[in-house]
Image (spheres, grey):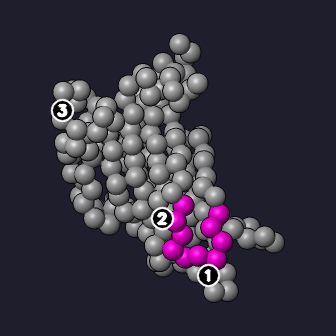
């Protein structure tokens, strides 16, 4: 097994589901896409033209090596003749996931809520969100309030894969 696989704590699959009431950055609408960064890793969704309530349903997978790094989402408006406009941003703290890994989850029944995360001034959650155990994976649906913008939220679903089978599938 390579050193990069050995240093991996797991895989985080992020489904960027949709945006709601995103800011208008063009004349009447926006052409939004989402960029997700974690440390030096960077991925993005496709652009949805002329829509402030886009549905992406785009799956992006990040190998987790440092649990102290937040997952950072930035929404942009695609522009043809100028720099893309920022439409807000949000952070996802994955430390609660890592804490759940240390709980010995293997014998839990599917659908078991492991931990409930409350909205705070620090996280970007709109509502309470539960971390759930399902088929060897930790999952969480969440609505994120976008910061540094007049309006907008993003709905995402997280799936954290713990086992080596998932890692080998991802890397093959």
Estimate the x, y position of residue 30 in percent, counting from the top left: 62, 76
Q: Residue at x 64, y 77 (%)?
A: 50
Does the CB distance between marks 3 and 2 fall below 8 Å?
no
Estimate the x, y position of residue 35 in percent, counting from the top left: 58, 55
Q: Which of marks 1 and 3 is in front?
A: 3
State whether residue 128 is above or below residue 150.
above
Q: Which residue is drawn at 38% across and 38% down?
A: 160
Estimate the x, y position of residue 18 in percent, counting from the top left: 48, 64
Quick check: 160 left or right of 128? right
Residue on which disc 2 sits: 18
- Per the image, label 2 sits on a secondary structure element best described as strand
Q: Residue at x 60, y 63 (%)?
A: 33
Estimate the x, y position of residue 165 in percent, counting from the top left: 43, 23
- Mark 3, residues whose alpha carbon is within 10 Å: few (<14), some, or many (≥20)? some
Which labelled disc corresponds to residue 82? none
Q: Nearer the viewer, residue 142 or 96?
A: 142
Q: Residue at x 51, y 39 (%)?
A: 62
Residue on which disc 3 sits: 108
Residue on which disc 1 sits: 29
- Per the image, label 1 sits on a secondary structure element best described as loop
Marks 2 and 1, the one that precedes in the sequence: 2
Label 2, label 1: how far apart the Cα atoms are: 16 Å
- Mark 1, residues whose alpha carbon is within 10 Å: few (<14), some, or many (≥20)? some
Q: Determine the image quadrant of residue 121.
A: bottom left
Q: Is residue 148 visible?
A: no
Query: Which span is picked out in magenta?
Result: 47-56
Q: Magenta segment, principal secondary structure?
A: loop
């Amino acid at each position: 097994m390579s050193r990069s696989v050995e240093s991996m704590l797991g895989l985080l699959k992020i489904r960027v589901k949709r945006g709601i009431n995103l800011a208008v950055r063009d004349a009447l609408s926006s052409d939004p896409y989402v960029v997700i960064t974690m440390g030096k890793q960077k991925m993005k969704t496709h652009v949805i033209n002329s829509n402030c309530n886009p549905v992406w349903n785009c799956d992006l997978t990040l190998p987790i090596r440092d649990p102290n790094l937040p997952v950072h989402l930035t929404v942009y408006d695609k522009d043809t003749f100028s720099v893309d406009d920022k439409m807000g941003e949000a952070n996802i703290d994955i430390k609660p996931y890592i804490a759940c890994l240390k709980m010995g989850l293997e014998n839990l029944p599917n659908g078991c809520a492991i931990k409930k995360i409350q909205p705070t001034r620090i996280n970007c959650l709109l509502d309470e969100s539960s971390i759930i155990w399902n088929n060897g994976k930790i999952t969480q649906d969440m609505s994120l309030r976008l910061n540094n913008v007049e309006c907008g939220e993003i709905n995402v679903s997280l799936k954290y894969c713990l086992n080596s089978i998932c890692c080998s599938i991802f890397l093959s």
